[in-house]
Structures are given as structure tokens and as C-alpha cells.
Amino acid sequence: MWRCLRCEVFSALPAMTPLLLLCGFVKIVTIATECVDRGDRFPENSVWIRNEYFNVTCKSGQIKVVNCISDFGTMIPLGSESFWENGIEYSCVDDDNGGSGEEPDACDGRHSEYFSNHFLVSCTSRKIVACVDKNGDIVKEGLFILDNGQLKSCYIYTNGKRARIDNKGCFNGTDYDDVTDESLHIKKYAIWRQGNYDLRCGDQGIHVYRCYLDKGKIMHAGSAWLDSNDAIQVCS
């Protein structure tokens, strides 16, 4: 699947396939292909924005990623492993290496439940029953933490057929702290000083925003320099 920082999109999604109309005995007419994205129809070669962070197009009845989009609207080329903008690092790569993007159905008789994108699905009830935190612990509702201090909230709808994970900023605590302690909650995009670093609550959790060097010098994340011994240092 294609990923761009916090969002994922599939490089090949289910879409309408070309239809063939047979006229007479030998004449075949191909009806123009189109793609269906969440109920909306898009003609062949059209381009639109999907999930806020991807430009996609319709090619031969399948949705293909054109490029990724940063929070500031910058186009990020496909295959970009690291792209920095305003202290935020992005990547635009295909994690599945050409996979279909479909989640496998793990209810094959060998498992009673399975995990998918931080959700726990019951094979017995065929329902989403909980969310899963960074340590693999089950959270049926409320706040939980993902990697890099991402603070999330889990909500499972009554019928169990739908669920959602909401962003709640960041959690500046340890694994032993209470996730409901609001004094450790950080609003999204907030910046604060911690030792020789400015930290920022970004889309992927807490990350270094600036580094403070000797003599009052400041370096932004991603910057590199040679120290007094000509050894390279990186603010990260």
C-alpha cells in the first residue's frame, strides 16, 4: 500500500472493469472505463485527491497513485523515502511492493480473531470489537497510545460493523503514566522545550523540531553540520 506520513492509500483498489458489448457476429465495442471511489464515479484519466494526502488517477479501471501531498500542499514524488517541509518528514512509498491493497480475511477457521490497522475483529461475531495500542493491548473504548506518543481515541459503533480512531494530539508521558492524565496531553502542532530540543506534536506523534547547540546556535530538524572535530552531527 502507498503511505504518506500518517495516511495510507492502496496503489490498486477495486474499481469497475471494462464492459464489452458484442454487436452482430464480429464487431466488439469497448465501453469507456471508469473508477468508483467511495461511491463517486471518475472517468478514465481523471485526477482527484483521495484521503487528503494523495493525488490519484483512473487507469484501465483501477485507481493509481500519481503523487503524495504534504500538509502545505506540496506535491511529493512517488518513491520519496524522506521529504522534509517545515520540520515535518514525509515519505511516499509503496509498502506492499505492488500488492493489491486488500486486507486478507484471517477468519479462515484457524483464528478466532485478527488485527487490522489497529482494530481487532472477531471471527465468531464478524464484528469489530476493539482497538489495539502500540503494545498490542486491547482498548474497547477511550484513549490509547500509538508509536511516538500519538494520542488516539477508540470508538466502536453499537452494531460492531463500524469503528473509528480519532486523533487527540500527543501524549508526553511514559508507559507507566495514566493515559487520561490531561497534564500530559499535548495539542496537535504544539511546540515545547525539553532539554536541548524543541519537540513538536506532529501528525506522526512527537518528534524533534529544533536542536539547541553551543553559543546559542539553533538547528532545525533534518539539518546537519560538522562539529569541532569535523564529525557530522544531525538534528533528529
Image (cartoon, rainbow, N blue to C red):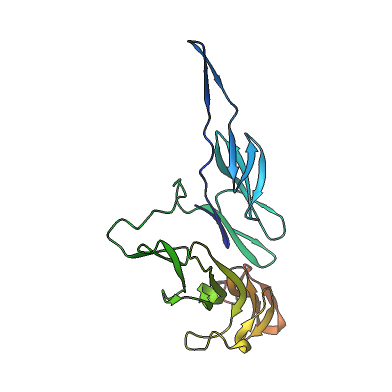
> In what quadrant of the picture does the C terminus appear?
bottom right
For the point 40% across and 61% down, the residue is 126
Pick out the residue farthest to the front: 159
Percent across and percent down for residue 92 are 57, 54
Q: Position of residue 193 (x, y in %)?
A: 66, 84
Residue 57, given in percent of the width and then of the height, sits at: 62, 41
186 vs 104: above or below: below
Left or right of residue 5: residue 98: left
Return the residue nearer the eye: 70 or 227: 70
Q: Up-down: is 193 above or below 219?
A: below
Q: Residue at x 59, y 42 (%)?
A: 36
| Horizontal and vertical percent position of residue 177 | 51, 89
Residue 203 visible, this angle? yes
Query: Which residue is farthest left?
Result: 110
The image quarter in which residue 61 lies? top right
Q: Residue at x 51, y 76 (%)?
A: 141
Q: Residue at x 38, y 54 (%)?
A: 105
> Residue 65's image quarter?
top right
Can the viewer see residue 231 in this picture?
no
